[in-house]
Image (cartoon, rainbow, N blue to C red):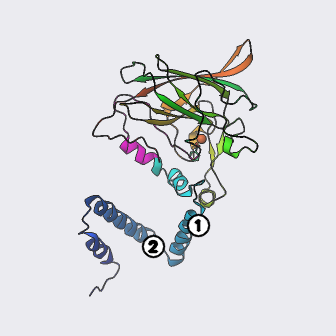
Amino acid sequence: MLDLDDTTITTAVLDAIADTADPRLREIMSAVVRHAHDLVREVGLREEEWAAAVDFLTRTGQLCSPRRQEFILLSDVLGITMLVDALQNRRTFGGSENSVLGPFFREDRPEFASGADLAPDRSGIRLQVRGQVVNHRGVPVAGARVDVWHSDADGHYDSDIPGIEGSAMRGLLVTDVDGVFTFRSVAPGAYPIPGDGTVGELMRGLERPLMRPAHIHVRIVADGFAPVTTMLFRDDDPHLDADPVFGTKKSLLARFVPTVDDEGEFERVEHRFVLEPVTTDSGEGDGRR
Ligand code: BEZ
Ligand code: FE
């Protein structure tokens, strides 16, 4: 018969799962138990605090739907999304780094020819983006499929803007023989992560900011290469130092260069994306969630 106290219960739980046939499940669940029990001991967790945590997680689950994933947002603000990516998707040949996918990616986006305007009806500073996709030796990658999506100047994605039929500020482009893709749009603005759920509650409790720096999401898929799910961040954005989802990286900063041509003023962004070949030991993971 078990007769446990606080000094013996951790070992008892570990013993109970020691014979799990699946070695990875055993490894992960043993670590979960050890770390969770240590946490309870370290902070001297009280019953009412554990009840509050269970209530928090219950409400987080209740907020999840096909349109909203509060648990992924929780993973993002705790830095777990970016930690998992950093460990699984190390770049060994100088490849472009990943960032978080975020909740606004959509599979049902239109495909555009290079140079297309993805936001002809949106107001704001006009934007021209030129990207080049190369391999780790600098050779252009033709035929790469490049998804781009971003917010408008006020920080709203198309799905949150009343009156937009279909999509805006998003699309699928394919690189040409020089590995180049270009598109026009409006310059994105900074915006807050959703603050009306349990994650917002937690962030307010922790006195953490919700604002993400202005960015353009880019996802690149090409045969034989590890996919890249990343973003270009406006390099003069004041929120760069406190991204609530820890997605910023120096290598992903982009200058939005003020430019004038016959059609007027616009901002120009150029960036070179480097793809690494798929290797057997790192797998084909891309940090997508
Ligand atoms: C985004 O950049 O779209 C995003 C990423 C993580 C959480 C919320 C939004
Ligand atoms: Fe975003």
What residue range appears in magenta?
A: 82-103
- Using the image, determine if residue 44 lies above or below residue 102: below
Residue 109 belongs to the span the image colors magenta: no
Which amino acid is tagged 1?
Answer: Arg
Secondary structure beneath dot 1 equals helix
Q: In the image, ligand 2 is in what quadrant?
A: top right
- Using the image, determine if residue 203 lies above or below residue 7: above
The numbered disc on residue 59 is 1
x and y percentages locating residue 148 in the rendered image: 57, 33
N-terminal label among 1 and 2: 2
Residue in view at x 73 percent, y 19 percent: 265
In the drawing, does residue 222 fall left or right of residue 173? Answer: left
Q: Which residue is mark 2?
A: 44
x and y percentages locating residue 151 in the rendered image: 66, 38
Residue in view at x 59 percent, y 25 percent: 255
Quarter residue 37 falls in:
bottom left
Secondary structure, magenta segment, majority class: loop
Residue 99 belongs to the span the image colors magenta: yes
Secondary structure beneath dot 2 equals loop
- Using the image, determine if residue 232 lies above or below residue 87: above
Q: Are marks 1 and 2 in contact (CB under 8 Å)?
A: no
Q: Closest to the observer: 108 or 232?
A: 108
Which amino acid is tagged 2?
Answer: Gly
Image quadrant containing the N terminus: bottom left
In the drawing, does residue 250 fall left or right of residue 4? Answer: right
Circle nearer the viewer, 1 or 2: 1
- Using the image, determine if residue 95 lies above or below residue 159: above
